[in-house]
Amino acid sequence: MTVVGHIRPAADDAPPRPERAALRWRALGLAITLLLWTVVLVLCLVPLALVLVISVGQKVEGAGWEWGFTAENYIRFLVGAQWPAETTFLYLTQLYWSMRYAVVASVIAVVTALPFTYLMTRQSRRAQALWLVFLLATLSLSEVFIVMGWDIILSNNSGLPMLFAASGLTDWLKATGWFDVLRDWGLANPRNVKFKTSEFATVLTMSYLVWPYAVILLYPALSRLDPSLAEAARTMGARPWTVARTVILPAVRLPLLGAVLLLFVFLLGGYVAVTVFADPAKHTTAVSVYEHVRGSTLNAPFGAAQSVILLVTAAVFLVIGHRLSRTSRGGG
Amino acid sequence: MGTLDRRTLLTRGGAFAAMSAASGVIGTPLIAQARTLRVGSYGGYFENSFKEHVFPAFTAATGITVESVTQPNSSDWLVTMQQATAAGSVPTDISLYARDTMIKASRLGGLIKTLDISKVPASANLDPYFVFDAGQGPLGVGAMSWFTAMVINPTEVSQAPASWADFWDSSKYEASLGLSKNFNALFLDIAAATFFDGGETFATDEGILAVIAKVAELKPNVALWWSAESQMEQAMKNGDVIGGQYYLDVSNLMAAEGFPIRPIFPKEGNPQDYGSWCLSAISDKDAEAAEFMNFSSDPATQALMSRKIGTAPLVAREKTDLTDDEFAFTSGAPAIKPAYEAYLDKETFIKEAWDKMVAGA
């Protein structure tokens, strides 16, 4: 006699037995697991597989592209389309700028958010709550909106350059010779200072963009920090800087590293700030991906190859970060 | 302001188009008796002007109702149409393609239908150049055209340049110009017309590289390499740049609103690009489409579009009743014809060489 044959007649008249209910729960659990896997498969793995497959596709000059199996998109990323006749590191340079902006902006954001968050956690609970609500609310501003705002702040007739000119600072700079230095740095034209396009504006906007995230990421660790540790150090005669360096920083080392890594990955795909504020010589892989996939050449394979490389780079950085945090945890 | 969006609507166009497509399918049975036609255009002010002024005039003349479909002015739309054609249902009967996109569509194949040009007699008003034929018969009938003009800020530049070559003068324009970052935004055609033999220079790789090298000399004077139309608009308004390349019609609109911008036709001229009406390969509205293209080719319609949308007419000026001012608002001479074929045949080469030059890599 099978189990099914045993249960079925009982189902009509008898109340469900405990094992039957358990079976039903297990079926439900299985269904949910299956559903989750389907979602992961459809939303993550299938698109990723598609990108991988497209990245080995073949570009047709003057038209679109077709399925294929070629490494030329990856080779182009390393040495350019004209290789071996000619070599260019254009795309590697773009990858370098992706990294550079993401690293610099995320470090600046975390480093400036740290003292702010620390001071915030020393406030009353009500003040903390207000700050957190305010910061969470600013997250609703999109990248486009923030870039637009900085665009206006840095513009010639409506922003900082106007203040420079109106306050006489521009004339002063011209009189003292600093203006020529700024022109050499690309931060001035013959008429006035200019902040667009510049690496300064790009990094500024990117770190501004992720700054609230940095605070929110650091907040839990800093608010759990026992104030008596710092007080003890102070009573033993340590100066505030020594307290920060020897007590607070070591205690939040891991959250700091985690925050930098997360913001780094987030900024790696930044697009709007770079297109608006960066000189084309300092554009990133994300911009190039967009141009090739959506631009007039319809070169989706090369765009896909670039995104695969960007993805691999991000993964490498995450693995290194993970290693670092494990070593530091072991050492601490 | 609306018109400023029309070429930048690239990303949103697809979604709008899909929505319009859905509504088209739902709406069909209700108006089955009436003759209808779905026509694509670039959205924003541009499309609104079509809906307000051009389509009603067409309906009044022929009794055919037009359903307007928003599409982007870019190769993006080819991907949408390719997928839609494969799925057996396209969002629009007639698409509006710039010439390079149209050539690309003809090379991709299976996207646009050959037209029976005898059903479009008014197309004789157009220069034959504007009725595109890739070898298997006419594929597109010119709709309207637009210029990319030299622009300056008249309050900063007292003496208007007589030649594009003036922009290379760093004593006047150091870090002060706005040029398009896209390799096929026709600045190469400008440089070729100014310093080389125009379109012929694009015949060889060496010629193309020489033109790109000439543009490289201009780099110290470029403050903004714009990728979206709105970036250049803002930069001119804000005084971040005092000259560069920009669309003639939009520049005139901005000037009319009081902003410090003045479009100029220097002695080499400005590049003229144009859009064509093309019929989807799987549309069965051949007759309606022919009537629409015929109506669009009429000098009166060309003048109407110039007045209401700001596009340049594709028929000789004498055939229209446009006044001097109205004509100068949208058009001018001489016109530089872009080297479309080279941009397509050598697209990877030109794009990479241009990108390298712009990036200084």
Image (cartoon, coloured by chain):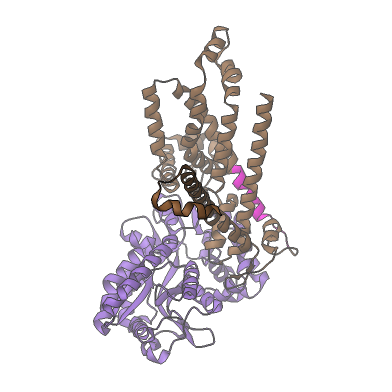
Chain colours: A brown, B purple
Furthest residue toward top? A236
Q: Is residue A86 above or below residue A248?
A: below
Furthest residue toward left? B60
Q: Is residue B272 above or below residue A134?
A: below
Residue B322 x, y percent position in the rendering: 30, 77
The answer to which quarter of the image holds residue B325 is bottom left
Residue numbers of the magenta segment? A86-100
Which quadrant, please, contains the C terminus of chain A?
Answer: top right
Residue B222 appears in view: no
Camera-nearest residue between B108 and A226: A226
Which quadrant, please, contains the N terminus of chain A?
Answer: bottom right
Q: Is residue B305 above or below residue A190?
A: below
Residue A240 x, y percent position in the rendering: 54, 15
Question: Is A95 positioned to the left or the right of B123 in the image?
Answer: right
Majority secondary structure of magenta residues:
helix
Asked if residue B95 is among those painted magenta in the image, a careful observer would answer no
Q: Is residue B291 above or below residue A60?
A: below
Furthest residue toward front? A1
Q: Residue at x 38, y 33 (%)?
A: A134
Camera-nearest residue between A59 and A206: A59
Camera-nearest residue between A143 and A38: A38
Camera-nearest residue between B225 and A76: A76
Residue B224 x, y percent position in the rendering: 50, 53
Residue A296 appears in view: yes
Q: How many marks?
A: 0
Question: Is B157 positioned to the left or the right of A51 in the image?
Answer: left
Q: Residue at x 32, y 83 (%)?
A: B295
Question: Is A261 positioned to the left or the right of B122 in the image?
Answer: right
Residue B101 x, y percent position in the rendering: 50, 73
Furthest residue toward bottom? B118
